[in-house]
Amino acid sequence: MGSGAGAAGGAWSRRRFVGALAGTAAATALPAPAPPRSSSSSSGRTPTAPETAVAAPEQPSADPSAPQPSSKPSGPHPLYLGTYTTVEGGGTGIGLATYDPETGGITGTGTLTGIANPSYLALHPDGGTLYAVNEQDDGAVTAVRRSDRKILGSRSTGGAGPCHLSVHPTGRWLLSANYGSGSVAVHPIGDSGALGERTDLVKHSSPAPGPGQEGPHAHQFVTSPDGGHVLAVDLGTDTVYTYRLDERRGTLTEVSRAQTRPGAGPRHLTFHPGGRHAYLANEVDDTVAVCAYAPDSGRLTIGEPQSTGSGSGTNYPAQILVTANGRFAYLANRGDNSLARYAVEADGARLRLLDTVPVSGDFPRQIAFSPDGTLLFAANQKSGTVSVFHVNDKNGELRLAGKPFASPVAVCALPL
């Protein structure tokens, strides 16, 4: 179950939407590719200079979920918050805030309006441009220049309900996943950060949908750590597709596919820093799986399902993250409303469940590390809050950093 904010009863509203706002719903967060590198050499752009304490790119992350080592933080850092604008109690655009990297405290600073249903956010590797999905029946992606918050325009994704996007490490291509229509799209990124016309659109027409699914549901589209492949996670077909991206033309060629057990409903994939293993959160059957990854071929091999640490009630795991040192992993459990902590062992080949901690919110749809990895942010959709946790780098323990921050229908947090 992913996100969802289209017309109730629409073909793509899925159980995840019903769950998020009434009792059956959700969103995404991609696997973390290798830490984004500056794209100034490939795009002709120079990194933007820090603005003010309210919105300055310090340690940009192309993916909300990707932790990156950095120097000791100081002063307030920018935080962007995704929401739905077309649901009751939703927001009016992208939430603007700052957070204290020492205490984890969040301060709201306003809203960037003019963008419909910005349920997932990503940043260009040079820090200058913010990208948002427009999760609606007529799906689109929007670019925003951070220096003056100018909307640089939107482009159609060619599908319904885009719920995830990521920027290729070169900074030249935007990858997006259309949940409602089960397709993935590629858009070129210009020197200004603006998006060009779509260069490719691939619909997942096979294999057949899994049990209880009426069609394909692409939930995530990300780049592998080696940069040689892009992977699409499809909840509807129980499949992870690997493509090779032509970096000159922006076209996709499928090179392999990996299937989960029927009805698993894969939602989110995250790579281990070593680049040869990944972890897959399966939303429908409430499991996680360790995957082997071959960088030369792009082939993913999915291992046996493991426990999410949830209780006996209904639970939909949303997203899994791995620390930059590769020692610990965290899983967001929607329904159980907890964060599961795993020890990562055998150079990434094994996950061992350690414990779970209450998320201090309802329905944690997305989680993200601060750039230095010392804080973990959880966007709690049903409670409309963002919880912040201190991350112990020695044992991976999580400690709640004060009272959660109120944010309307919080479905994505992007800390910079």
Image (cartoon, rainbow, N blue to C red):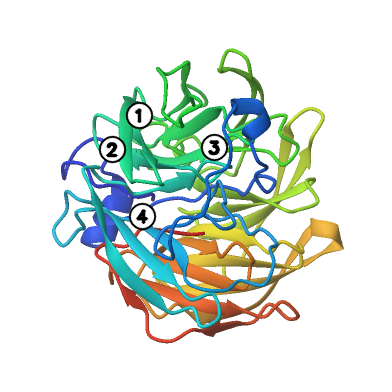
- Dot label at residue 26: 4
Quadrant location of residue 55?
A: bottom left
Q: Residue at x 24, y 29 (%)?
A: 138
**Precedes in sequence: disc 2 or disc 3:** 2
Of helix, strand and loop, which one carries label 1?
A: loop
Q: Is residue 147 above or below residue 355?
A: above
Of helix, strand and loop, which one carries label 4?
A: loop
Cα separation between marks 4 and 2 = 12 Å
- Locate residue 283, reporting x and y percent: 47, 54
Task: Decide if residue 289 is in sight here.
Answer: yes
- Locate residue 119, reporting x and y percent: 34, 49
Please name the residue that numbered disc 3 is placed on.
Answer: 167
Looking at the image, do the residues carrying marks 1 and 2 touch, with CB atoms under 8 Å apart? Answer: yes
Q: Could you tell me the amino acid type at mark 1? A: Ser
Please name the residue that numbered disc 2 is placed on.
Answer: 12
- Locate residue 413, reporting x and y percent: 42, 60
Q: Could you tell me the amino acid type at mark 4? A: Ala
- Dot label at residue 181: 1
Cα separation between marks 1 and 2 = 7 Å
Pair 3/1: label in front: 3
